[in-house]
Image (cartoon, rainbow, N blue to C red):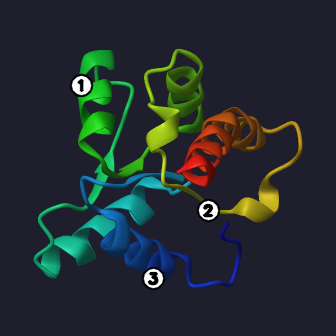
Amino acid sequence: VLGVGMGTRMIVQELVRMYARPSALVFVLNLSKAEQEAVDRELLAEGMRRHLRVITSETSTKERQRLYLSGGCFCVTNRILIVDLLTQLVPVDLVTGLVIDKAHRVRENSTEAFIVRVGRPGRERERERERER
C-alpha cells in the first residue's frame, strides 16, 4: 500500500525487481502511464529481462490469461483486474501480491477495496493448505 510522499516509483521498482519472476504473480494498480514507463525504463536500463508488464484493454482475454499463468508483475487497470478476478481468469491462488499506489485515496466502496476482498478467499484457502502440510 503506497501513498503520497513515500518515494513510490523507487518502491515500485524494487518490488518489481523482487517479484518479476515466473513463480510470482503481482498486480500493480493506479500507476499513471508516465509512472509505468519510468519504472519500466529504469528496470530495462538495469538489464532486467522480466519487468513490469502493462495490461491494457487491447490485450485479449486469451493473452491476459497466458500472461497471468506465466507469472511476473503486471500493471493493470482496476476495471480489467476486477473483471478478470470475477470471471476467474486470474488464478487467485497464485496471486503473490497487490501493490496499490495512491492508496490514501482508496475508500471502502472503491474498486480497489473490492479487488482486495475478492482476492482474499483464495489466499485463505492457500494458508489452510499450508497449515495442513
Image height of 63 relative to 101, above or below: above
Q: Which residue is mark 2?
A: 101
Q: Position of residue 52 (x, y in %)?
A: 31, 58
Spatial CA distance of label 1 from label 3 is: 29 Å
Can the viewer see residue 71?
yes
Residue 59 horizontal side relative to residue 91, left or right: left
- Residue designated by label 3: 10
Where is mark 1, residue-wise?
Answer: 63
At label 1, the amino acid type is: Glu
Residue 42 place in picture, x, y as percent: 25, 77
Left or right: 112 with respect to 12? right
Quarter assignment of residue 79 = top right
Amino acid of disc 2:
Asp
In the displayed image of the protein, which residue is found farthest to the right?
A: 108
Q: Secondary structure at mark 1?
A: helix
Identity of the residue drawn at 43% across and 72% down: 15
Left or right: 2 in relation to 63: right
Please give the name of the residue rendered at 18% of the width and 61% of the height, measured from the top-left corner.
50
Mark 1–mark 3 contact, CB under 8 Å? no
